[in-house]
Amino acid sequence: MMQRGFIVFLLWSLVSISHAETMIGKLQWAEKTQLNAAVSGRIEKISVKAGELIKQGGLLLTIEQQLYQARLLQAKAHMLAQEQAAAEVEREMNNAAELFERTVISEHEFVLAKNAHALAQAQMRQAQASLIAAQNNQIQSQLHAPFDAWVLKILAKENQVVDLQHQLWPLVEIARAGYMQVEVHLNPQQRSQIKIGQSVKVKVSNKNYNAFVDQAELSASGQGDERLFRVSAIFQTDKLLLPGQSAELSF
């Protein structure tokens, strides 16, 4: 009886294996992006080279640090001056309120004091906004990697001037490190077995990876029996794999 059960299990395993589909596809970057400047100015320094691995937050390039640092110091000084001016106007308004209550000054003089106070408060808020803008510009004058990435291309040069008012172009092209995507094209019957998020297997250079389906298009290329649906899966890898490498996708 036990032997018969083992034979049934073996036959079921063989049927399962025979139903597994393996397709040949090509690797591509799981996530590739081009980074633009957030501020205008002269590119002072490019800190990476194409082909380098850079950690999240790593410095890619710098745009006129002295200029934006100077503007930040200027905004801080202006903010301090406005705070002091607003404090003085507030003291004057409080004094005017006390004098008005004692009928020492007229209502018109008290209204003028309140208007001066409101204006000082508005000027201080404007100075605060200018300071925040200067702080953001100073931060954005340095371009950092948004995630661990491979530097694919440097699209700018040192001393090149970036002018956001007239032209916006990418400066650096990067790809997320540690993740790759394999793309295959399936016939309608194969496509019917696939759903988003499904676990699949990927094999690259005799190494197996656990992957999941991230895209499964519903529109096909071709006509009739030649219709093919684009399907892709993402997997993690601790080694450098390159776009165009052949890969097997099994599901």
Image (cartoon, rainbow, N blue to C red):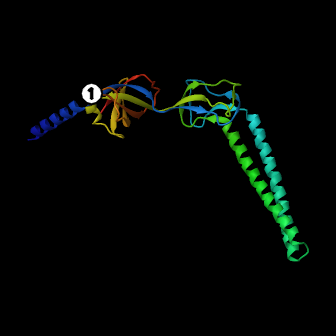
| Quadrant (top left/top right/bottom left/bottom right) for the N terminus | top left
Is residue 239 in view from this perspective? Answer: yes
Percent of width and height locating residue 237: 43, 31
Where on the picture, by quarter, is residue 68? Answer: top right
Left or right: where 250 falls relative to 241: left
Question: Is 234 displayed left or right of 90 in the figure?
Answer: left
Q: Quadrant of residue 235?
A: top left
**Residue at the disc numbered 1:** 224
**Quarter of the image where the C terminus is located:** top left
> Would residue 197 appear left or right of 39 to someone viewing this image?
left
Residue 154 coordinates in the image, percent (x, y): 60, 25
- Is residue 23 left or right of 242 when viewed as pictured? left
Mark 1 Cα-neighbour bin, 10 Å: few <14, some 14–19, many ≥20: few
Looking at numbered disc 1 in the image, what kind of residue is underneath it? Gly
**Element assignment for label 1:** helix
Q: Which residue is drawn at 71% across and 47% down?
A: 132
- Is residue 155 placed above or below 1 in the rendered structure? above
| Front position in the image: 31 or 221 | 221
- Where residue 240 appears, as percent x and y from the top left, is 47, 26
Q: Is residue 50 above or below residue 209?
A: above
In this view, the residue farthest toward the bottom is: 102
Q: Residue at x 38, y 32 (%)?
A: 232
Question: Is residue 95 in view?
Answer: no
Nearer the observer, 183 or 189: 189
- What residue is drawn where x is 33% and y is 35%? 200
Of residue 242 and residue 172, the one placed in the foreground of this image is 172
Residue 248 in picture, x, y percent from top left: 34, 26
Pick out the residue farthest to the right.
104
Number of numbered callouts drawn: 1
> Quarter of the image holding residue 44?
top right
- Of the pair 115 and 120, the residue shown nearer to us: 115
